[in-house]
């Protein structure tokens, strides 16, 4: 069950990452034909990230203490002391960015170059931060694995 | 100051995002350095991270709402360049404070 929760968390995180890259590319070529799609995708990115956040939050609060104890006894304690600690707080920034994205995308992106620039910056930052979160998640998982391997 | 060409909510919530990103980082430092702050957050919802997240999200919504009502309801007036600079700086500073703290400060 915990594995399914973790996999769902990663799945929605990756979906948010893909959606943000999609929005970035569409915003570069904003036109009357893709403006509605940009707005729908920005909402989708927000929904994906909120799902990833809530699922991960549930897992973190309920199940993570077991993994944390394993990581701290293993050869990669930094997987918790740096990567998990930063991930659990940086992800709040990511959540704020994706919540803001639909607001920025609600402007007229075809006629308004300034609004397009805001969407490009925000979707670009979301993509980079989501990629960073995926990387940190991988290191945390590896921290558990190497700790179990040396047992 | 020049009028912005994006909506007042884009400006107000953009500024709120920058501000709450920095507050998020400061709250990390405060709770890790002060056992009483950590205990207070723990007591609020039963888990410090849940309280921390709820506070930051509430502040984001509250500041965005307040900034949109400034200037007699017209919202804070900023150029888009200033908005983008503030937004990116807030997120980068917030991120660097968190990473720097766990790298050298904790």
Image: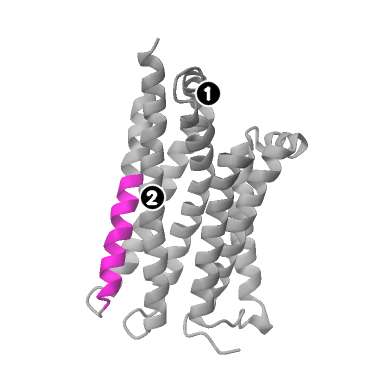
Direction front: furthest residue: B104
Q: Which residue is mark 2?
A: A130
Residue ID at (35%, 26%): A3
Q: Which residue is mark 1?
A: A65
Residue ID at (41%, 44%): A133
The residue tagged with tag 1: helix, strand or loop? Answer: helix
- Which image quadrant is residue A31 in? bottom left
Residue ID at (48%, 41%): A87
- Point out which mark residue B43 bears: none
Q: Position of residue A103 (x, y in %)?
A: 45, 68
Residue A136 on the magenta segment: no
Q: Position of residue A141 (x, y in %)?
A: 38, 29
Crowding at dot 1, Cα within 10 Å, few <14 / some 14-19 / many 20+, comes out as: few
- Which image quadrant is residue A5 in? top left
Crowding at dot 2, Cα within 10 Å, few <14 / some 14-19 / many 20+, comes out as: many
Direction top: furthest residue: A151
Chain letter of the residue beneath label 1 in the structure image: A
Chain letter of the residue beneath label 2 in the structure image: A
Compared with A70, B92 (above or below) is: below
Q: Are marks 2 and 1 in contact (CB under 8 Å)?
A: no
- Which image quadrant is residue A122 in? bottom left
Q: Nearer the viewer, residue A54 or A117?
A: A117
The mark total stands at 2
The residue tagged with tag 2: helix, strand or loop? Answer: helix
Direction left: furthest residue: A33
Give the main secondary structure of the magenta stretch: helix
Q: Which portion, as a residue range, is magenta?
A: A13-30
Q: Position of residue B75 (x, y in %)?
A: 61, 79
C-alpha span from label 2 to label 1:
24 Å
Compared with A111, B84 (above or below) is: above
Residue A20 on the magenta segment: yes
């Amino acid at each position: 069950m915990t594995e399914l929760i973790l996999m769902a968390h990663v799945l929605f995180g990756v979906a948010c990452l893909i959606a943000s890259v999609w929005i970035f590319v569409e915003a570069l070529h904003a036109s009357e034909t893709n403006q509605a799609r940009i707005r729908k995708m920005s909402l989708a990115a927000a929904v994906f990230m909120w799902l990833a956040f809530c699922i991960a939050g549930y897992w973190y609060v309920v199940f993570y203490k077991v993994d944390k104890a394993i990581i701290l006894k293993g050869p990669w304690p930094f997987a918790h002391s740096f990567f998990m600690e930063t991930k659990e707080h940086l992800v709040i920034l990511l959540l704020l960015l994706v919540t803001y994205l639909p607001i920025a995308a609600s402007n007229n992106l075809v006629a308004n170059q300034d609004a397009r620039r805001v969407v490009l910056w925000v979707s670009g930052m979301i993509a980079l931060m989501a990629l960073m979160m995926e990387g940190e998640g991988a290191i945390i998982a590896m921290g558990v694995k190497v700790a179990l391997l040396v047992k | 100051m020049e009028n912005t060409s994006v909506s007042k909510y884009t400006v107000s919530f953009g500024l709120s995002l920058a501000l709450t990103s920095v507050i998020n980082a400061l709250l990390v430092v405060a709770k890790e350095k002060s056992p009483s702050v950590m205990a207070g957050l723990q007591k609020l919802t039963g888990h410090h991270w849940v309280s921390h997240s709820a506070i930051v999200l509430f502040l984001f919504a509250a500041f965005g709402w307040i900034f949109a009502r400034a200037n007699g309801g017209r919202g804070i007036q900023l150029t888009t360049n200033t908005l983008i600079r503030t937004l990116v700086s807030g997120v980068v500073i917030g991120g660097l404070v968190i990473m720097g703290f766990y790298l050298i400060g904790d």
